[in-house]
Image: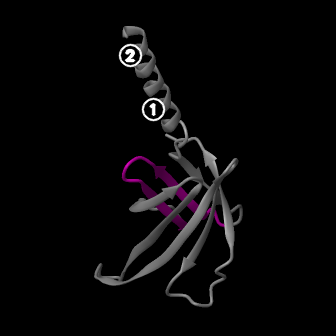
Amino acid sequence: MRYRRAILILAGCVLATSAGAASPSRSGYFDSVRVSAETGDEGGIQIQVNDGPSPTVDVSLCEGACHDPIRFPAKIKGDRISFLYVEPLFDLKGAKAGETRAKVEGRFVSRGLLLKMDFLDSPDDDKNAYALIPRRKRQP
């Protein structure tokens, strides 16, 4: 009887461990920022993915320079990720003057994160353009 109980407990532990192993962590830092040799301006995107029970992304779009990242809730399912990017726009006096919104979808690949951004307020943008954002180690 004692032997049977030990086997059942061990089997339950094995099942729990194998169920948890099915979802690898998707957390990481992804960075495609490059510096222009002509102007010294930065351009690209930086993303910190934070998975777990309530996944988030910290996103910084860099145009000219990189600014403080903005945090958004994300959906991560398997190798897929999606989130809504909303960046507030301000006038010269600091008053809110609108926002930039983009539906972002992508998937995790061996070299990084393959993303497609659909800017919702710009219907002429190429909605089928994907960009590879390489996985990098965060710089101090």
Which residue occupies the extreme top position in the image?
2
Q: Nearer the viewer, residue 58 or 39?
A: 58
Q: Is 1 drawn above or below residue 21 in the view shown?
A: above
Left or right of 21? Residue 10 is left
- First-in-chain label (2 vs 1): 2
Q: Is 50 drawn above or below residue 129 in the view shown?
A: above
What kind of element bears circle 1? helix
Left or right of 99? Residue 94 is left
Percent from the top left, x then y, of residue 96?
A: 31, 82
Q: Amino acid at mark 1?
A: Ala
Left or right of 86? Residue 120 is right
- Label 2 neighbourhood size at 10 Å, few (<14), some (14-19), many (20+)? few
Task: From the image, tell me which residue sits under label 2.
Answer: 5
- Label 1 neighbourhood size at 10 Å, few (<14), some (14-19), many (20+)? few
Q: Nearer the viewer, mark 2 or mark 1?
A: 2
Task: From the image, tell me which residue sits under label 1.
Answer: 16
Residue span colored magenta = 39-63
Q: Amino acid at mark 2?
A: Arg
Q: Is residue 56 magenta?
A: yes
- Residue 83 — which label? none
Q: Residue at x 51, y 74 (%)?
A: 103
Q: Residue at x 43, y 21 (%)?
A: 8
Q: Residue at x 63, y 85 (%)?
A: 125
Which residue occupies the extreme front position in the image?
1
